Amino acid sequence: MDFNVIMYIFFGIVSIAGGVILVGAKHPIRGAMGLLTTMLALAAMYAQLHAHTIAVFQVIIYAGAVMVLIVYFIMLLDIKSEDYAKPFSKFFWFGAPLLLFAVFYFIFKLSMVIKSDGAFFATLNPSLVSPNAPEAFGGIKIFSKELLTKYLFAFEFVSTLLFAAIVAVIAIVQLDWKGKSNE
Amino acid sequence: MNFDPIFLIGEFSLVALIVILTLVDAMRKPVFALLGSSAEITPDIESRNRQATWIAGIGLVIVAAVYFIFGKATSGESVSLLHDSLRAGGGVYIGKLAIIGAGILTILLSARYTMAQSIPAADYYLLLCFSLLGALTLIAAENFLMIFLSLEMMSIPIYALVGLKRYNSRVGESAIKYLLLGGLSSAFLLLGISFIYGMTGTLVVNDVLTHLSQVSQTVSSEMLLMGLGLVFIFVGLAFKVSLVPFHAWTPDVYEGAATPVTSFMSVAVKLAAFAVILKIFAGSLLFPAFDPLFSRLFAFFALLTIIYGNSVAIVQKNVKRMLAYSSIAHAGYMALALAPMGHNIEAVQAVLFYGIGYIAMNMLAFGVLVYLTYRDKYCETLEDLTGIARKYPGAAAVMSVAMFSLGGLPPAVGFVGKVQIFLQLINGKFYATAVIALLFSMVALYFYINVIVVMYMKEPEAEVANIDKKSMLPVWLTLGFSTLFILILGILPSPLMEWSLEWAKMLF
Amino acid sequence: MNNPFTDFIIGSGGIYTIAVVLLLFTLGGMTVLFRRTLLHMLMGVELMLNAVNLSFIYFSRLHQNHDGQILSLMIFVVAACEVAVGIAIIVHLFKRTGTISVETYTAERG
């Protein structure tokens, strides 16, 4: 088997392991580490899938900025230990197996259907797929060109969305400054 | 790329308003300097709030006027702009005007709210404007990327708006509940989009629909994944319009949020999300492989929603909570028109008609609750309404109009809307569904009429408290405008039918 | 000629990737639905969005257009916004009640 294939499968398993840690961990900080593992493994998978730019952003923005924010606030809030006494709600013990069963059943069904089709779904629509990606695909140059021409409006729109989020945070934080006296 | 800015004049002027509001607020003393120390600075906050209210209110009226005048030129043909990002012109004109109208009514109601609660009004109006911007682009969105971004633009400010309330310790809870379930729903929407994208290789809605109409009916992996994708998209949007069983957030959030915010959420957000559902599922392109599935899905969820919403609303003591359940039930009625799934334009028109009419009725019902604010306390329960007819005959009268319209009695716009929806069901031969839905709208009459009975027939236990007299005029404007809208279009519905038909043509 | 990895990607790697996506998505959903601390639930939403990102990037590689990659970049930004607003609300709640366990918030009425 090809080394790349093995690594791809390996990183997929690592990412699922990170997800399991997130669900099962008692303390949020462990969960955060699990999530971080998932993110880094996914970044590796992105790089293999020719999405180099996104892989870099995944490490910088997601694993870097967003996770640092979350971890910082987990530590800042310094929650009492009785908050973790019972980490799961009472629905967990029958809800979780049910969900997992549904997912595995769907995957099983899908793989059966694919087998009976005789073709994997990627080859069902051959006009869309040329197997080998060009070298430049997913690189920063071609990616940013597409982002700033075809998706220019979305790009500007999302910057407005960031502004909206800033205003939202400021509005909520302002409530605390005077809120106590009014209660 | 030929791009004529006139097509986006509504969005551009709204963004200009946002910038002006931000700059004006930034010119003044920083808010934390005001809020930090003691009570004698309260008048300053009040003047700030008054200024922000004036700017936001007049600004939004100007936006509406600019869009009404300059956008009129675009209402002839529709074009797709900026590499299929947005569709503008044509019937979208009507939809955007309806949404901006809902925004204006909300700001008029909020004037009183921000005064009474002394929250930083500039932020409040900014968030409202952002949410409005999201709703405007959502109904015009032409590819899935813009649908997702606009949905987030519409929701994220509302997460914060729900939390902006002072005299209640439970509001943060409803805000975080809404945020988490909203995140869940957008994840569902995105998973659906990703499968659809995977199977078709494009994000443009019309191309995707063309692909879908060509999928063969035999079970294949392509069909399986596409079906799963469509179901996930439906689930994600059903969260936003709160169909049962995706309604868990609705009662708590509607009750916890400030009344003007609740009214905005229940009309504008719902209408915009329904426009997207219609665009994806009810357009002219048949998708033969999935039609039976979605016909059943819509009928099932709509009936469930109607039955649940109406029967739980009966036992509510809190009027706001009752209206929340009633808004769940109304989403059910709107989804019901889609059940025949004939891809005929009348069904789309019926839903849009109902949605636009619902703006006026719900604004009126919530407007009365805002009107009856006692000092530091919003009128929210049935006891607060007991016997108010003597002291405030005007409020009681318009509340009765709202209840008639919500209950679907003539001569209100709600009656016409319900008739159209039931006609669609009968055309599509969904007789059993129609009978059950009709039965439950009879049940619904009980709690709507009950409000009128309580207001007119019951003696109040204590004397009716005096209401707060601050900034009455804007509330009266809202009440008057909505009442006129309901009554005139209830008696002469043809203009609204034409408008909604025009909008429906766009989504087709 | 294709290299083996490309063969894998357009072949049996498809069902493997979809399995990973669906499993991560379910794990994230379970975190949101069944955990009791708010920060944990917020991380669950992040996990779900990550799963969706993998799906987009895989399909973007298959179709060799950048639409999916750009959409996943937008998801990064939206997720950051949601986390920022969510954490602001959580801190606000923590200051009021001194806990971030949902148990205390679910005193249900009617």
Image (cartoon, coloured by chain):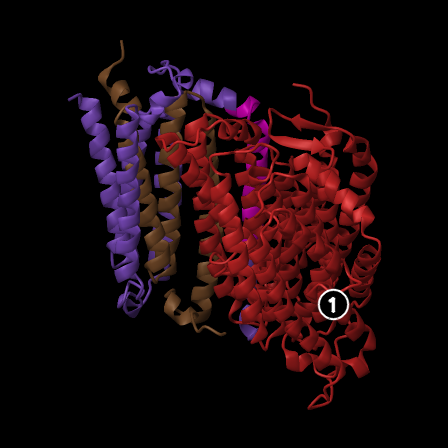
Q: Which chain is red?
A: B
Q: Which chain is brown?
A: C
Report helix, strand or loop for mark 1: helix
Magenta segment boundaries in residue numbering: A147-169
In the image, is residue A156 part of the stretch drawn in magenta? yes
**Which quadrant is the N terminus of chain B positioned in?**
top right
Residue under the point 26% across and 44% down: A104
Q: Quadrant of residue B191?
A: top left
Residue under the point 73% across and 31% down: B7
Of all residues, the one furthest to the bottom in this rendering is B461
Closer-to-camera residue (B192/B287): B287
> In the image, is residue A2 above or below residue A108?
above
Would you name the residue on which mark 1 appears?
A: B404
Residue under the point 29% across and 30% down: A114
Q: Residues within 10 Å of mark 1 (few under 14, many from 20)?
A: many
Q: Quadrant of residue B441?
A: bottom right
Q: Position of residue B421 (x, y in %)?
A: 66, 52
The reply, left or right, for residue B34 in relation to residue B97 is left
Closer-to-camera residue (B284/B131): B284
**Which quadrant is the C terminus of chain B positioned in?**
top right
Q: Which chain is purple?
A: A
Q: Quadrant of residue A81?
A: bottom left
Q: Position of residue C86 (x, y in %)?
A: 46, 54
Under mark 1, the amino acid is Phe
Report the predominant secondary structure element of the magenta stretch: helix
Q: Is residue A166 visible?
A: no
Residue under the point 80% across and 82% down: B391
Tell me which chain the residue with mark 1 is part of.
B
The reply, left or right, for residue B449 in relation to residue C100 is right
> In the image, is residue C101 above or below residue B505?
below
> In the image, is residue B25 above or below residue C20?
below
Q: Is residue B164 visible?
A: yes
